[in-house]
Amino acid sequence: MWDPAVYHRYGAERSRPFFDLTARIGATRPATVTDLGCGPGELTASLAERWPDATVTGIDSSPEMIARARTLDTPAEFRVGDLRDWTPDADVLVTNATLQWVPGHRELLTRWATGMPPGAWIAMQVPGNFGAPSHRALREVARGPRFAGTVGDVVREAPVDDPVGYADLLVATGATVDAWETTYVHLLPDDGGDHPVLRWMEGTALRPVKAALDDDAWPEFRAALGERLAAAYPVRHSVVAFPFRRIFVVAQLPPETTNG
């Protein structure tokens, strides 16, 4: 289960990549815009503000996220759905920090790129920090003797490609591609309570781990991970520097051609 309140921790830091991504979309008057993995909907609402004449739809697999999104004052529409079932019919597709959760998403990207209208845009962003100390610590704790039997298979190695791999995939469909990566250095305030990186991870990466553990094991897991994170990300000047690599791709599909 996704918890919108926990996900909203560090909301400004989580939102910035979305705006860096969508700033590269060159569409001017799209008729339809879809946000796959829209979460609590605020970022989808910004798409409706940018393209007020478009039909903007946010889709997410979490009923809790969609319930939160439907409370927003926005013309955007929201519905629960599995992005793997989406019909690729939008003029603009945005999927931000979502595809890392979807096995086989490279095949989905190819299907979308070959099924969307001529000249349509695909904009995607995924985290590229699976080799960072935070995720190495997560795998160490999960696969250690205490927890391997319950969550050892829950944590993952890198489930995403690099920018070159995604660019190659979409260029092969005839698209014009802009691909890049950015490492954000988030300076997370330390209030003397739980380690800030632990609090960040509870909003996303730790969600399936918590779901797999019982009420006794989860605090123990959380404490063990917190110790490793405190060593990897020390507090300096009342903040924790948390580098976070992200991978971006914006692709425009080839325009419709006519034979002369």
Image: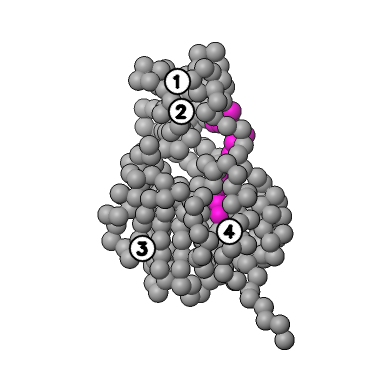
Residue shown at 41% from the left, 64% from the top: 56
Q: Which residue is mark 3?
A: 76
Secondary element type, mark 3: loop
Q: Are marks 2 and 1 in contact (CB under 8 Å)?
A: yes
Mark 1 closeness class: few <14, some 14–19, many ≥20 residues within 10 Å: some
Residue 186 screen position, x and y as percent = 50, 42
Q: Of tags 2 and 1, which is closer to the observer?
A: 2
Q: Secondary structure at mark 1?
A: helix
Label whose residue precedes the other's in the sequence (2 or 1): 2
Magenta residues span 124-137
Q: Which residue lies at the image location 42% right of the left edge and 54% below the top edge?
A: 59
For marks 2 and 3, give the CA distance: 32 Å
CA–CA distance in space, label 2 to label 1: 9 Å
Return the x and y of residue 172 as percentages of the image width and height: 72, 59
State the image coordinates of residue 46 (x, y, percent, origin top left).
Answer: 40, 62
Q: According to the image, label 4 marks what residue?
A: 112
* Image: 170 above or below 104: below
Disc ID at residue 221: 1
**Separation (CA) of disc 4 from disc 3:** 22 Å
Q: As drawn, is 88 to the left or to the right of 199?
A: right
Q: CA distance from mark 1 to mark 3?
A: 39 Å
Q: Does the magenta run of residues contain 179?
A: no
